[in-house]
Image: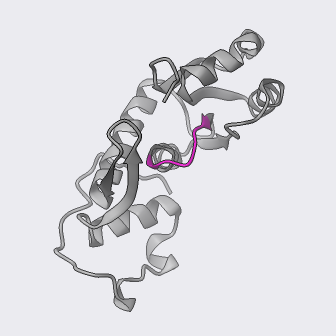
Amino acid sequence: LRVNFGSNSATSTGMGSPTNADIIPAADARTLTGLLMERARRSPDRVAYSRCDPTSERWTDLSWQQTVEAAGRWQAALRREGLQPGDRVGIRLSNRPEWVCFDMAVSGLGLVTVPLYTNDRAENIRHILDDAGVRLLLLENQKQREELAHIASGLHQLKRILILEPGDGKR
């Protein structure tokens, strides 16, 4: 099942607290991306994720609707890369909402996510990327890019590296 996150399928329902009636059966969701879309349809304004911003040291929330919208932006970006269903896309992020949004976008386009440990050695990452035939890689920051600099030239199938937080990699 391929899902287009750019559609207006997630709309406000005004639902309050979750109840047993709010459980989404597997038959309704069919896939993880289907589950995200159904959750956003049923409760778009409820909090999906909370995280602490390290700069401001304040907690911010991301609603289910905002999660779907972020996945839609990732899908638009991935479409511009010319990737085809079945193509492999690597991701090397810590546990954060962007991981989920990117993964849902990838799945919704019929691409395959290749997850990488954030603390793995460059040689191991090179082997995984090469063996899986990864065409695009999402990194968390410039520091990760620098860690992979000496192996990048040998990755002939890798067409692009994206960096989520460009800066200097320091927090």
Residue at the (48%, 42%) spot, across then down: 102
Q: Determine the image quadrant of residue 65.
A: bottom left
Residue 80 spot, x, y in % from top left? 41, 25
Q: Is residue 22 above or below residue 107?
A: below
Q: Is residue 15 above or below residue 100?
A: below
Count the numbered circles shown: 0
Whether residue 95 appears in this view of the structure is yes
Q: How is the image coloured?
A: one colour
Q: Which residues are magenta?
A: 91-97
Q: Is residue 2 left or right of residue 58?
A: right
Please tell me which residue lies in front, 171 or 162: 171
Residue at the (56%, 19%) spot, across then down: 160
Residue 23 spot, x, y in % from top left? 41, 83
Residue at the (18%, 66%) spot, across then down: 12
Please tell me which residue lies in front, 15 or 133: 15
Q: Is residue 53 above or below residue 124?
A: below
Q: Is residue 135 left or right of residue 38?
A: right
Q: Determine the image quadrant of residue 61.
A: bottom left
Residue at the (59%, 26%) spot, across then down: 136
Q: Determine the image quadrant of residue 150.
A: top right
